Image (tube, rainbow, N blue to C red):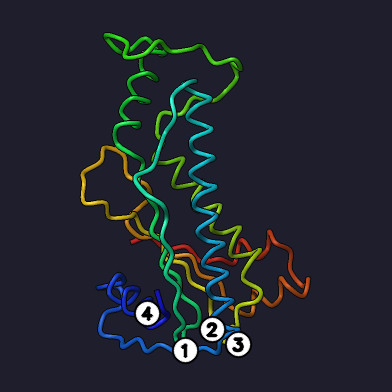
Amino acid sequence: MNARINSVILVLALGASAGAQTLVQTELPPDARRQVDLFSDSLRSAIVNAGRKLAERAKEVVPGIMLRFETDPAVFGTWLPKEGAMFLVNVPAIEATSAQLWEINRRIGNGSAPAPVVTPNVPVNPVVPTMTDPVKEYSEFTRQALVDAMLQNAFALPLKDGQSLTVIVGEMETGRPTTIAAVPRRLYLSIASEDLAALKAGRISEDDARKRIQERRY
């Protein structure tokens, strides 16, 4: 998908959050466009890793049961002349059938379900913390993975002073109802170009930069 189509999709996806503001795309030279595409790939990999981490956690709690996801993540990047780099990240929802099977077997393991679907195994490690809310853990794994990607892979983006890097996270629309969603409807993560430059130059630590990321939820 080319940069112009990405821009249109992103603006339409933002909907009311853009309000009456007119968003105009800046045409980027090939090298800059390549950096935007590479950063998009890093965000996509972050979502995949978050899903893998959730699946591993779920399997620790209910051995033998694997949480799956509706589809692959999708990332659309664009460039706005005043705002800077903006990326829309669509996170796949947890696949409903595997989520229901996992929940039933978790309850069986806790003695709160009437009849087993499969025979649950006792976790090998008895100190594994229980997981009763996959949605919450998936949301946190996703947030952490995206923040890490922003702080580790955004240095090559051609940001100027006064601009920022913004990652907008939403759930993938599958067209089918699910019992477990992925993340809040919209999570906005934003960091100023000056803070990224300070991190790159070693003037602030990664922990300091992490604290400077603004988070909003709508």
Foreground of the two, 66 or 167:
66
Residue 199, image x, y percentages:
71, 70
Looking at the image, is mark 4 or mark 2 nearer the viewer?
A: 4
Residue named by callout 1: 82
Residue named by callout 3: 161
Q: Are marks 4 and 3 in contact (CB under 8 Å)?
A: no
Q: Taking 123 as reference, is 200 left or right?
A: right
Image quarter where the N terminus lies is: bottom left
User: Tag 2's secondary structure?
Assistant: loop
Question: Callout 2, which amino acid?
Answer: Gln
Label 4 – label 3 distance at C-alpha: 22 Å
Question: Callout 4, which amino acid?
Answer: Ser
Question: Callout 1, which amino acid?
Answer: Lys
The first of marks 1 and 2 along the sequence is 1
| Residue density around tag 2, few if under 14, some if 14–19, many if 20 or more, within 10 Å | some
Which residue is at 26% across, 73% downward? 15
Which residue is at 21% across, 46% downward? 176
Residue named by callout 2: 163
Residue 217, image x, y percentages:
38, 60
| Residue density around tag 4, few if under 14, some if 14–19, many if 20 or more, within 10 Å | many
Image quarter where the C terminus lies is: bottom left
| Residue density around tag 1, few if under 14, some if 14–19, many if 20 or more, within 10 Å | some
- The mark found on residue 7 in the picture is 4
Question: Callout 3, which amino acid?
Answer: Asp
Give the residue at the far front of this rendering.
Answer: 1
Which residue is at 77% across, 75% downward? 201
Q: Taking 122 as reference, is 106 left or right?
A: left
